[in-house]
Amino acid sequence: MDHPCVYEIRVEGHLTDRCSEWFAGLTLNQTEAGDTLVSGRVVDQAALHGLLARIRDLNLTLVAVKRLEQE
């Protein structure tokens, strides 16, 4: 059953502020290790796959995808 979940997606490199429009509704945080965490609520698996496709299309290096525990 699909339901909204919170995901944290780590990509290699620091994304610019311009990139935030590509990930509307999600939070971008740069890490000291040089990666960017894209995080937020994803409505279903189809939306998650769309987000991962966008990362691929932008030629970003995917480091990790993690589903966070719900409250």
Image (spheres, rainbow, N blue to C red):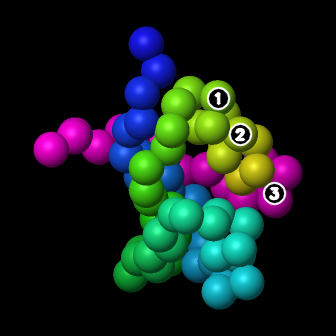
> Between residues 68 and 25, which one lies in front from this camera angle?
25
Residue at image mark 3: 59
CB of mark 2 within 8 Å of CB of mark 1? yes
Which residue appears farthest toward the top when viewing the image?
1
Whether residue 9 is visible here, answered yes or no, is: yes
Magenta stretch encompasses residue 59 = yes
What segment is highlighted magenta in the picture? 56-71
The N terminus, quarter of image: top left
- The amino acid type of the residue labelled 3 equals Asn
Marks 2 and 1 sit apart, C-alpha to C-alpha, by 6 Å
**Quadrant in the rendering for residue 14:** bottom right
Whether residue 12 is visible here, answered yes or no, is: no
Q: Regarding mark 2 in the picture, which secondary structure is present there?
A: helix
**Placement of 3 over or under 23, stated as above or below:** above
Crowdedness near tag 2: few (<14), some (14–19) or many (≥20) residues, C-alpha within 10 Å: few
Marks 2 and 3 sit apart, C-alpha to C-alpha, by 14 Å
Question: In the image, is 63 to the left or to the right of 51?
Answer: left
The C terminus, quarter of image: top left
Which residue is at a point 67% across and 84% down the rendered structure image?
16
Which residue appears farthest toward the bottom when viewing the image?
17
Residue at image mark 2: 50
- The amino acid type of the residue labelled 2 equals Gly
- The amino acid type of the residue labelled 1 equals Ala
Which residue is at a point 66% across and 46% down the rendered structure image?
51
Q: Position of residue 35 (x, y in %)?
A: 51, 70
Q: Position of residue 32 (x, y in %)?
A: 39, 81
Q: Regarding mark 1 in the picture, which secondary structure is present there?
A: helix
Which residue is at a point 43% across and 56% down the rendered structure image?
40
